[in-house]
Image (cartoon, rainbow, N blue to C red):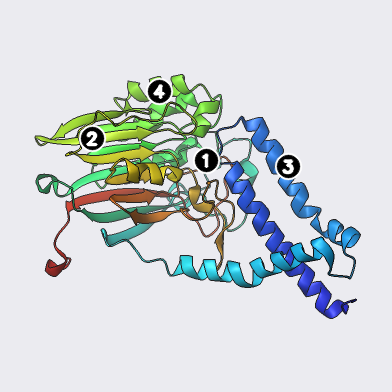
Amino acid sequence: MEWPWSILVPFLAAAWFGHAFLMTVLLNWWYAQPVRRVYLKIGRALIALLVFGFPFAIGFLAGNRIEGWFGGYLWFCVAITAIYLPLISWSRWRRPQPTAVVGNASRIVDATEALGDKPVGNGSHWRLACLPGNQVFQVELRDLNVRLPRWPVALDGLSVLHLSDVHLSGTPGRPFYQCVFDEIMRSGPPDILAVTGDIVDSPHHHRWIVPLLGRLRWRVAAFAILGNHDKYYEPELVRRRLRRLGIRVIGNGCEQIDVRGVPLLVVGNEAPWFRPPPDLSAAPRDVFRMCLSHTPDQFGWAQQNGIDLMLAGHVHGGQIRLPLIGPLFVPSRFSRRYDSGQFASGPTLMIVSRGLAGREPLRYNCRPEISRIILNAGRPASQGCD
């Protein structure tokens, strides 16, 4: 049966959108794999071909007849657009805040306003930073108050500054980082600094690590792990520069520290890009466990290993978030499930940062962020919350 064009065109448009969504999910999964960058680019090119070649495939295989196996696929893609995507977007929008998070306040630091000009720099993608409406220089500084059942009461009020995805590459320029880091320090140094990877994104910007991250201070200790982009650019050099600042680079390992006479276990997880994954079989079980993981894909591993608090980044919140729908490209095996924010399951609370920068300086409806997390011991529900 031939369909009239007034019905066929909207139908095919919905099918194309559903097909593009499925291809984006595939791209998200592919970009979460520990493969060489050249293979990532090949996969991205193939998926782009499948998306933008879809209308031509429709014309060749279907014409104005919706039948056969290709017609069945078109109906499936329309169902994705008309049913699945609205339902999953509604579910994400209605996602409750974990009860462990009892306070969430934020303010915006606009580096362009503070500096009097856009700190674009000279990175290879600097032109993207100049696009109208781009929020790449507007950083959200968040204060999160968290209560966790195994947190030691003696350490109530301890603060952790979570910094992720710095991506030193020339754009943003150095004045951007100087402005943001100095603004963070005006609130006083945190007790612990936690850096969750992707510090450099260029073979020429390792020299920025010491002068820029050296502007940060802490009272007790600083810890760092590396991310997939660090692996591309001399990871051992990145580790050496961080250690020069007094930052403990724990990699796929763990370290126990004493804070006010109370032990804490800090765990690093750089999987899947650096191996072997951490082995906690010999680590004490009765000690609070905080994990620095570059990707939120390790959430299941954290639950299995009794992690109390997991800090992650990597996915940048998607960088471009569409109204109602949210982000599309989120480089995770779980696609958009853990794009940003707080997630709780089993013994673990995971906080996923949108990160400070990215290889492509594009941010729409998804500002960069840095979080200061204030930790307190959990209280019985009957006592309520302050």
- Closer-to-camera residue (202/109): 202
Q: Which callout, 3 or 2, points at the residue further toward the start of the chain?
A: 3
Q: Measuring 68% from the left and 63% from the top, which residue is drawn there?
A: 18
Residue 2 percent across, percent down from the top left: 90, 76
Q: Decide if residue 332 is on the left or right side of residue 345.
A: right
Question: Is residue 189 at least partly visible in the picture?
Answer: no
- Whole-Å distance between the Cαs marked 1 and 4? 22 Å
Amino acid under disc 1: Pro
Name the residue that disc number 1 marks: 172
Q: Secondary structure at mark 3?
A: helix
Marks 3 and 1: which is nearer the front? 3
Amino acid under disc 3: Ala
Name the residue that disc number 3 marks: 45
Marks 1 and 4: which is nearer the front? 4
Q: Residues within 10 Å of mark 3 (few under 14, many from 20)?
A: few
Amino acid under disc 2: Leu
Q: Secondary structure at mark 2?
A: strand
Residue 319 percent across, percent down from the top left: 54, 52
Q: Measuring 89% from the left and 77% from the top, which residue is drawn there?
A: 1
> In the image, which disc is placed on residue 265?
2
Q: Which callout, 1 or 2, points at the residue further toward the start of the chain?
A: 1
> In the image, which disc is placed on residue 221?
none
